[in-house]
Amino acid sequence: MLYYVTIALQGFCIYHLLKNRSPYYWIFLIIFLPIVGCVIYLITQVYNKRDAEEITEEITHIVNPTKKIKDLEKQLQFSETYQNRVNLADALLENNDYNNAIPHYLEALDEHMQNDYYVIKQLIKAYYNVEDFEQVVLYAEKIKEHPEFKKSKSQFLYGLALEKLGNFEAAEANLRAIDIRYSFYNERLVLAKFLISRKKEAEAKAVLQDIQTESQHLTKPNKKIFRATILDVDSLLTHLQTN
């Protein structure tokens, strides 16, 4: 049990420092001195009496994610508000329970009686993960003129859904939107693979070379996060250069 509590503490502390842009040296203290590092971080960077209850709740949710869902279900039963329903749907989505998240998002949309960008964005993610690509396209087209849709992961999923449905030109246009320097590394790797499948090896190679160059300037934490992606990029580039 102590092991899981320690992992949960480390996860919360790292999440908190990334969210609040605390100095990265805290990551090493938290990882290499798990208990002591977490305690020092919580006391000096997080803890006050008002936050104590919130911290305890977050750690509990990390250890037992289903508890969060059960608590939100009770909250929705007590008060069937739009926000309570969206909160429950978000928790289900976070727990990869897409089939149960979707009905709550749909009901929230009905309750709101308008095109809610946030809920539709979440629906796109849920529908993509259950491979209902027609619904992904349907809902993406409801918000594709929204300024936040442009160059977003929602647009990327829209492009992937269009590819699955055989609309390759529209798919490419939307997938290319996320080809932005120093971001979307995983998605840009997928873009390169898409371009290769469309016999556009030179363009794919250019995307991969950009990622490879940018990877040399990543911070150490980001190099660790994107290590597998960068290795795939290097391997794919080598393959293209030798064929």
Image (tube, grey):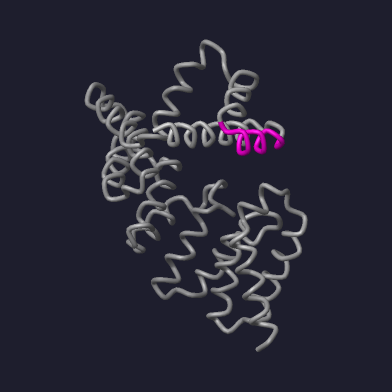
User: Residue 112, image x and y in percent?
Assistant: 34, 34
Q: Is residue 123 magenta?
A: no
Q: In this view, does 130 lie to the left or right of 122?
A: left
Using the image as rendered, state which of residue 166 and residue 200 is in the foreground: 200
Q: In which quarter of the image is residue 117?
A: top left
Q: Residue at x 59, y 61 (%)?
A: 228
Using the image as rendered, state which of residue 111 and residue 68 is in the foreground: 68
- Residue 173 against residue 50 in the figure, above or below: below
Q: Is the stretch drawn in magenta largely helix, strand or loop?
A: helix
As drawn, which residue projects farthest toward the left?
Answer: 77
Q: Quadrant of residue 174?
A: bottom right
Q: Which residue is drawn at 64% across and 63% down?
A: 230
Using the image as rendered, state which of residue 48 and residue 105 is in the foreground: 48
Residue numbers of the magenta segment: 24-34
User: Residue 41, image x and y in percent?
Assistant: 62, 25
Q: Is residue 124 left or right of residue 190?
A: left
- Residue 31 against residue 217 in the figure, above or below: above
Q: Is residue 33 magenta?
A: yes
User: Residue 219, image x and y in percent?
Assistant: 73, 48
Using the image as rendered, state which of residue 223 and residue 150 is in the foreground: 223
Q: Is residue 76 left or right of residue 5?
A: left
- Residue 39 against residue 204 in the figure, above or below: above
- Image quadrant where one finds the C terminus: bottom right
Q: Which residue is drawn at 40% across and 42% down?
A: 119
Q: In this view, does 206 lie to the left or right of 64?
A: right
As drawn, which residue projects farthest toward the top?
Answer: 49
- Image quadrant where one finds the N terminus: top left
